[in-house]
Amino acid sequence: MTSSAWLKWLLLAAGLAVLAAMPWLVGEYPLNLIITMIIYSLFALSYNVLFGQAGLLSFGHAAYFGLGAYTSVLLFKDLGFSLLPGILGAGLAGGLLGVLLGLFVVRLGGTYFALLTLAFNALIYAGAEKWRGLTGGEDGVAAMRPDLHIPFYGDVGMFSTVHWYYFVLIVVLLSTWFCWHFTRTPLGRLNECLRENEDRARFIGYNVYMSKVAVNVISAFFAGLAGGMAGAFQEFVTVTFINLDKATDVLIMTFVGGSGTFWGPILGACFLTYLNQVLSDLTEHWTLIQGIIFVLLVMYAPQGLSGLLISLKDRFWGARAGKLNPAAKGEG
Amino acid sequence: MNILAELPVQALHGLVYGMLLFLVASGLTLIFGMMGVLNFAHGALYMLGAYFSYTILQLTGQFWLCLLVAPLVVALAGILIERFCLRKVHSYGHAHELLLTFGMAYIIEELVKIFWGNEPLRVVLPSLLAGSIPLLGIEYPVYRLFILGVSIVVFIIMFFVLYKTRAGIIVRASVANKRMVDALGFNVPLVFLVLFGMGAWLAGLAGVIGGPYLITNPAMASTIIIDLFVVVVVGGLGSIQGALIASLLIGQLQSIGILILPQFAIFFEFLLMALVLIFRPHGLMGESK
């Protein structure tokens, strides 16, 4: 292994160690903030499977997230599910919706995709708002977070923030590993190829339509999983989980973090969730600041914060000549 | 009251909203057809029209002055966005342009909340427009007829300009084939700028006349943007006739839908969109490029 590969593994190990030790490092309140960051990291990561990797700009990812949140809370409340089946159910619900909507929305790319996802998100939102018997409309539904049932061991209480933190961390780490691994599978490679040159993929003989549907389902599954955990975390779900603001929040997080790298969306989700927390205590115009950051990045740093970091690193630690700089992609 | 008796009145309501929607959508679809940019900020510009109009009315008390000045200010805002922001990201591709206009919409909405507050604002109409007249067996608000009149007049002027003048020919030619127009020596960036300004002007005008009718509030933009996008999808991207047909259809679907199935009225337009997508993916009047 080269020294840079060693460095990467070392950084990864250190990062995992810090995450594992987090409950001893920070208090109860910051730990809650960190749980939010972790959940939104997964949401942004799932979004980037479409946006960064497939090149599909979606304005409707809240549909999957919100459906996941409703599913987990309703499974806990009405059917008495324990924690893990409820959260997995949320992911499956997201994935199913991903099949259903995917069949429509991926038919046309580019701007049409953006339009359609937005419109379908509005449709799902209207459904959640009108179906009061199930969703409680604007009042929402509440359900206590159930215990985690482990076979041959027993139940682990989730009332404690530390236990809940570890549960979320493990689910998100496994999902992150899967998403990272996915980029190396044939379908993951094809996904990036579709972004770069869809016609060529078609000429080679790939079924472009079904591949896009499959990718949409994977993305929707993880968005549903994130939503399910967000619902379980709040122990309450309402239409704000599924509205247009939620859909654009994840877009902004992913873009600000940088869609060109795998870890960019995680960076964006953590950065904006943290800023949101800090700035919303200081000023009520936090959303305006977020909008301005977003527009400035769109205009001057289209690869987001991770692109900025990479170009800074290259400037100070010197990129070897001829090495392709990912930050330069898309600027031509 | 039975449904049949209310039908003509509801159809008239739908016509008023449909025409208003068309005023906003026409600019959006022309800009899209020509520049390939789906202007997310279009709904926000429409909202700005309503708010500028409110402020001018507060200052001067002249509604007619609002009608004249507010759309021009909005057009200026649109031109500034095009010239200093949109043009900068043009080389990054359409997705970036869409993201930029989305960011602009976001910022405008927040600014509106800061300057004018979160509460809906009441616009006092001039006495000439405030009353109602007997029509179709009920007292119909004059103001809605005024909206209908203004939008029809603007529609006629727009068609005349687009189809009978040289400037209109250049615009239509640019929608059809931008490169060719460029090659023939026309200043395409300037055409873009003017068209963007005109689209913003139309949105602003729709905001001025729509504000008192649909209530001036900070959610105006996000409410209309869904309808706008459905219009653009159903009508076909870049088609002005398509936009007209789709706007009128959605107006009718909403108002008659409320009459027949009040709970589900909102789903009709999505159903329409889904049907169009299945059978004519490029919209009623759109061409597949």
Image (cartoon, coloured by chain):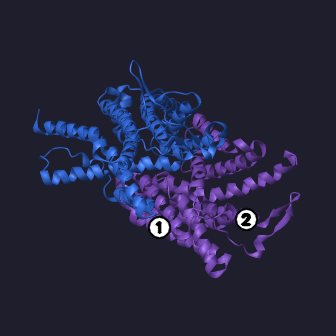
Chain colours: A blue, B purple
On residue B213, the disc is none
Q: Is residue B40 left or right of residue A34?
A: right
Report x, y in % for residue B97. Answer: 42, 54
Chain for disc number 1: B
Q: Hey, what amino acid is under mark 2?
A: Gly
Give the camera-side residue of A297 and A164.
A164
Identify whether B127 is placed above or below A168: below
Q: Residues within 10 Å of mark 2 (few under 14, many from 20)?
A: some
Report if residue B273 is visible in the image: yes
Residue B147, image quadrant:
bottom right
Q: Does label 2 or label 1 sit earlier along the sequence?
A: 1
Give the camera-side residue of A67 and B35.
A67
The structure residue drawn at horizontal position 84% and vertical position 66%, both measured from the top left corner, is B133
Identify whether A178 is placed above or below A139: above
Report x, y in % for residue A203. Answer: 37, 29
The structure residue drawn at horizontal position 50% and vertical position 53%, both measured from the top left corner, is B32
**Residue for badge 1:** B79
Q: Residues within 10 Å of mark 1 (few under 14, many from 20)?
A: many
**Residue for badge 2:** B149
Going by the picture, which residue comes out furthest to the top? A152
Identify whether A250 is placed above or below A173: below
- Marks 2,1: beta carbons within 8 A: no
The structure residue drawn at horizontal position 28% and vertical position 43%, both measured from the top left corner, is A24
Q: Hey, what amino acid is under mark 1?
A: Ile
Give the camera-side residue of A188 and B171.
A188
- Give me the C-alpha separation between circle 2 and circle 1: 27 Å
Disc 1 is placed on an element classified as helix
Identify whether B201 is placed above or below A267: below
